[in-house]
Image (cartoon, rainbow, N blue to C red):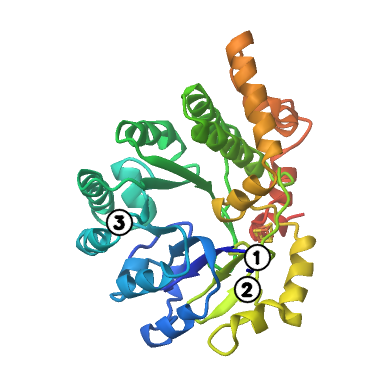
Amino acid sequence: MSKKLNGTVIVTYRCNAKCTMCNRYKVPSKPEEEISIETIRKLPEMYFTNITGGEPFIREDLKDIVRELYKKSDRIVISTNGFFTDRIVDLCREFPQVGIRISIEGLEKTNNEIRGLDDGFNRGYTTLKTLVDMGMKDVGFGMTVQDKNASDLVPLYEISDELDMEFATASLHNSFYFVESNNIIKDRLAVAENFEKLVNRLLESNSPKKWFRAYFNHGLINYIFSQKRLLPCDMSFDTFFIDPYGDVMPCNGTKEKEVMGNLNEQSWDELWSSEAAENVRKKVRCCDRNCWMIGSVSPAMHKYIWKPAFWVIRHKFLRFFKKKKYSMFENKIVRDYRDGRVTKEQLDACSTCEACAAKK
Ligand code: SF4
């Protein structure tokens, strides 16, 4: 039996939000060209599938897609902005085991400003509460941390904690997927300070899962200071993304879209072992974008488990025996920046933000 993969299915590029850090809504897919059930049937066996967009619940046949995907996937998580409460609730009634992650970018005012969705916070929050009240077990928030909302990071974590929900974080990235190349954190120290507080809140909990999330957030500090990824990136080896047009890609972090093949036209085996797929894998091996998004980091954390595990053990030991909290200054680059050995311009130039890189 061949190895199960980790897949992300981008079911649509249509979106009802207008996030400041993502221009995808300006380049939507057309309903008639979006990935069909026939193409979804050709996907391989997966141990994990993320369904995302655009806004996946814009597709009125999402239930049919999920039904089909459950035939080949052990676990499914849908990323959504939570706006279409009725559709989400309806889907969750049929699939109570599905995971739902709702993007909430801050407390009310900040969220609505960043997402460009009037009443977006209340709609998202109402959806979350409704799902929890229904007894859904796998529900959580997702937040893209940036200058504007960093101070809401810990308060939002607290809300998720009270509701006993997962809390997923990300930071600004640039790529073809976001149709954006000028995202960048301006005040790195201020943003990192909020991540530092979150790391400490996660480390003080009794949940091993949260300790590993602390490591992920430590990796985000490393990322916003434009440093090399803490873990290797093996996207396209046992992980893939497929877009609404049937194109299979290694990830959503590359500058231009990298295509391994098209599942509308090829069989999975043909596509996965093709020369085009091998060429993409060669590019991934020397990719220098250093992104740190859960889609590429979660498989790496499982594969190279000893690295995060060592970090967790060390920090739990320091807390317990030495009463020493995590500090962002244990990252050399953060110390160098604080002490003026590295300038903002130098960090900006190493980022994937094209406007800053051009100034080099
Ligand atoms: S580092 Fe990995 S996830 Fe990021 S763009 Fe490169 S290959 Fe994709």
Instruction: Give the mark nearest the N terminus, 2 or 3.
Output: 3
The numbered disc on residue 257 is 2
Could you tell me residue 188's position as x and y percent?
60, 37
Residue 15: tell me if it is visible: no
Q: Quadrant of ligand 1?
A: bottom right
Taking the view exactly as shown, the residue that stands out farthest to the bottom is 265
Quadrant in the picture for residue 162 = top left
Could you tell me residue 353's position as x and y percent?
64, 56
Disc 2 C-beta below 8 A from ligand 1: no
Mark 1, residue position: 254
Where disc 2 sits, the SS reads loop
Disc 1 C-beta below 8 A from ligand 1: yes
The numbered disc on residue 242 is none
* Amino acid at pointer 3: Gly
Where disc 1 sits, the SS reads loop
For this view, does 57 lie left or right of residue 42? left
The correct choice, above or below, for 292 with respect to 14 in the image is above
The correct choice, above or below, for 322 with respect to 277 in the image is above
Neighbourhood count class around disc 1 (C-alpha, 10 Å): few under 14, some 14–19, many 20 upward: many
Which is nearer the eye, 54 or 204? 204
Which is nearer the eye, 178 or 78? 78
Mark 3, residue position: 82
For this view, does 329 lie left or right of residue 61? right
* Amino acid at pointer 2: Lys
Residue 277: tell me if it is visible: yes
Which is nearer the eye, 334 or 33? 33
The correct choice, above or below, for 256 with respect to 290 in the image is below
Could you tell me residue 243's position as x and y percent?
51, 74
